[in-house]
Image: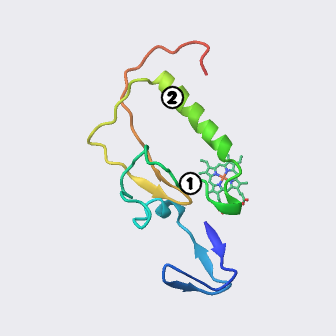
């Protein structure tokens, strides 16, 4: 996320002048060892769970509720259609980084089942 500095400020020992352009890595914030005890651990039970996936402050994502709903429905449909799958333990994930950082692919193993008519 890009921002332009409005007033001189020092953040993390770095001095920024008004007009400077800053590129913020929201993803890196989620792995900040100054904030999280185990920043490299995927911990879905972490409480609180303060990630910046949808930003923060006045520009926080206005589509967050829709995005979360689409995600939930997507997982529900996936798990309904594919309740049993595994990931090859030898699989080595690769990641791409842009405005988000994401796994490029995740091959699943599952037994094919007959298609249920009427399903989406
Ligand atoms: C997984 C899906 C999504 C992610 C990860 C995401 C992430 C973000 C983030 C991080 C920001 C903050 C940008 C900033 O601080 O400069 C943002 C802003 C925004 N998002 Fe999303 N977003 C998602 C889906 C959506 C959807 C579905 C919509 C609309 C239907 C949407 C509309 C917006 C808008 C309009 C803003 C700008 C808000 C503002 O500047 O006041 N987003 N989003």
Residue at position x 58%, y 38% in the image? 71
Circle 1: element type: loop
Q: Position of residue 10 (x, y in %)?
A: 56, 83
Q: Earlier in the sequence, mark 2 or mark 1?
A: 1
Question: How would you rate the neighbour count of disc 1 (Cα within 10 Å): few for under 14, some for 14-19, many for 20 or more?
Answer: some
Distance of label 2 from label 1 (alpha carbons): 22 Å
Q: Quadrant of ligand 1?
A: bottom right
Which residue of the protein is positioned furthest toward the left in this rendering?
A: 90
Q: Which residue is mark 1?
A: 53
Q: Position of residue 5 (x, y in %)?
A: 66, 79
- Residue 3: quarter of image: bottom right
Tell me whether the residue at label 2 lies in contact with that at label 1, contact meaning CB atoms closer than 8 angstroms.
no
Q: Is residue 75 above or below residue 43?
A: above
Tell me if the residue at label 1 has its CB under 8 Å from ligand 1.
Answer: yes
Q: Please state if 115 lies on the left or on the right of 64 as rendered.
A: left
Residue at position x 39%, y 49% in the image? 42
**Which scheme is used to colour this image of the protein?**
rainbow
Circle 2: element type: helix
- Name the quadrant of the N terminus: bottom right
Question: How would you rate the neighbour count of disc 2 (Cα within 10 Å): few for under 14, some for 14-19, many for 20 or more?
Answer: few
Tell me if the residue at label 2 has its CB under 8 Å from ligand 1.
Answer: no
Q: Please state if 115 lies on the left or on the right of 61 as rendered.
A: left
Residue at position x 63%, y 83% in the image? 20
Q: Position of residue 91 (x, y in %)?
A: 31, 43
Q: Please state if 5 lies on the left or on the right of 106 as rendered.
A: right
Front in this rendered view, residue 63 or 49 = 49
Q: Position of residue 34 (x, y in %)?
A: 42, 67
Front in this rendered view, residue 73 or 11 = 11
Q: Which residue is mark 2?
A: 78
- Residue 99: quarter of image: bottom right
- Name the quadrant of the C terminus: top right
């Amino acid at each position: 996320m890009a921002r332009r500095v409005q007033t001189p400020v020092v953040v993390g020992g770095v001095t920024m002048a008004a007009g400077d352009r800053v590129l913020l890595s929201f993803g890196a914030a989620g792995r900040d060892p100054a904030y999280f005890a185990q920043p490299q651990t995927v911990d879905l039970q972490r409480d609180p769970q303060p990630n910046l996936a949808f930003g923060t402050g006045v520009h926080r994502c206005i589509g967050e509720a829709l995005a979360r709903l689409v995600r939930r429905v997507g997982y529900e449909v996936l798990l309904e259609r594919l309740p049993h799958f595994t990931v090859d333990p030898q699989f080595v994930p690769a990641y791409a980084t842009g405005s988000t950082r994401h796994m490029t692919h995740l091959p699943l193993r599952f037994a094919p089942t007959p298609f249920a008519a009427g399903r989406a």
